Image: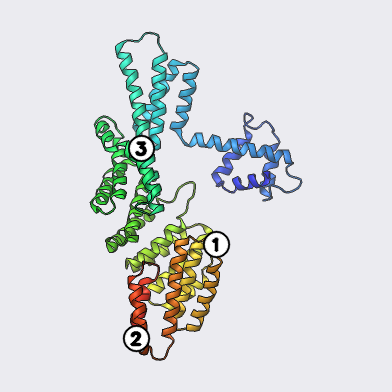
Amino acid sequence: MHKKRIISVLNSFDRADGKRFEKFLESSYFNNRPGLKKKYLNARRAKNIDKSGFLTGKEKSYITSLIINYLKQRSIEKDELESELKLLRELFLRKQSRIFDTTSKKIMSGFNSKKRVEPQLLLKLYDYYTLLYNQHLTSSSKLNQAKVRKTLNYMLKAGISLTVYQMITVVIDYTSIIFYKNIPDDEFVNDYYDLMIRPLNIDYFYNKIKSDYEYAFLLELYSSMIKSHINIKDESEYERYKNLLLKYSSRLEKSEVTVHLQSLLDYCTRKIIRMQNENYFLSERFEIAMLLAENGFFLKDIYPYIPTDFFATTVILGLQANKIEETRNFIVLYSSKLSKDDALPMREYGFAHYYFKTGDYNLSLEHILNFKTKNDNFRHDSKILEIVCYYKIKDFDKSENALKSYSEFLSVEKFLVKSRKSRIKIFLGSFKKLIKYASMADTRKYKNEISFILHNLQKSEDFNYRDWLIGEFRELLY
């Protein structure tokens, strides 16, 4: 157990973390076993922390606790404001008024020096003003009108900061629910709105604080976010939200800009799914995705790679938007920004779709056959692309064999979402008919049957390759 814990955390250390942890081991305050550092270093050099003769079971357990304490210490060191607030709280509890006042001024200077903000700062402001309020209330027994006003002002600022933060959190949660549920009148979505959003009256609160509260613009931005997602048919709400983000982007932390760009991305995706002004939002979504990629918005400390879902969706929708060469450049430039395990497979995946779009079906097939993944979503997509590629190069036997193999796999697939499985089955059923008629010597004899299939496809709900199937059946007719 200790071996697994140690290796798991140590594997997350970069070179700087490794050096810092070695220094951490030198501190007698944290480590009261002086000889442990040498044994630890020997075990690390041997690249086997559990190798016999290096560390005993108790020493491994002790190192695990030291690693945990190191991570706690690092989390404090990384956030200077949070560290200062912890100190301020300690000074208040110890009734150290003079040092408290000096430290509180330093903290306010830290707040004022922040040119870029994110909602998490509001929680720190809440803690800060709550401590000032409590300190002011208890530092003197004499309460005059000026002191009461100042004390109440601290309380008000603390309350506003907390309220704005809570409103923002609820908005983020609600827009996430809307996107992932993607059902306009789903009971859970409506209940959440009635219980959590409707009572907030965000616009009323914003109008009350906008002239006096420095960070009111955050609430204006999030108010626009939720309006755009709720009123998805009104595209002017989307444009207003996008313009507000441009207006305030210089005042937002990079991570906060990412939140809003992702929200705009989700909005575009919802519009594409609903086929509302689809061409415009396909192009819009690709431009926003490129902005995210070019500025490294996804490259965070915790997970310093572009997510595979983001990469794959950008490729597919970019090609759908006819951003052909832009998508090719995206694949070349940003496949290397994926994790080591995903970089090469997703490059193959990207180029498989790129060459299919450009009509080079042999190359598309070559890349998709080289694509190996454990991700079920991509596995289904790649199998369908393989079937279609064989069809396009007129290798109907291999296409039928691939179709049969995939259909058998799909029949025992237990983890695929029911609605997606249903759409894939519609595609497979239609494709089976396509091969049947395409492999016949004279398809004109079956014009009525093909026309009937084409008519039903045009009336059917949307699914992957639906438009492609319609085009292929039309080719059989003419």
Write down the quadrant of residue 216 in the picture. top left
Q: Earlier in the sequence, mark 3 or mark 2?
A: 3
How far across and how far down the image is residue 386, in percent? 48, 74
Residue lying at the far bottom of the rendered structure: 441
Q: Is residue 348 visible?
A: no
Q: Earlier in the sequence, mark 1 or mark 3?
A: 3
- Which residue is painted at 29% across and 32% down in the image? 214
- In the rendered image, which residue does mark 1 sit on? 414
The vertical placement of 125 against 364, above or below, is above
| In this picture, residue 344 sits left or right of residue 196 | right
**Structure colour scheme:** rainbow
Name the residue that disc number 3 marks: 167
Residue 318: percent from the left, percent from the top?
A: 35, 64
Disc 3 to disc 2: CB gap under 8 Å = no
Q: Tell which tag, 1 or 3, sits nearer the viewer.
A: 1
Residue 27 in percent (x, y) is at 62, 32
**Res. 227 visible in picture:** yes
Residue 395 position, x and y percent, is 47, 83
Instruction: Say which quarter of the image contains residue 442.
Output: bottom left
Residue at 45%, 31% (x, y): give it: 82
Residue type at tag 2: Lys
Residue ID at (50%, 17%):
94
Image quarter where the C terminus lies is bottom left
Q: CA distance from mark 1 to mark 2?
A: 38 Å
Label 3 is placed on what type of residue? Met
- SS category of the residue bearing label 2: helix
Q: Badge 2 is on which residue?
A: 447
- Disc 1 and disc 3: Cα gap in Å? 39 Å
The amino acid at mark 1 is Lys
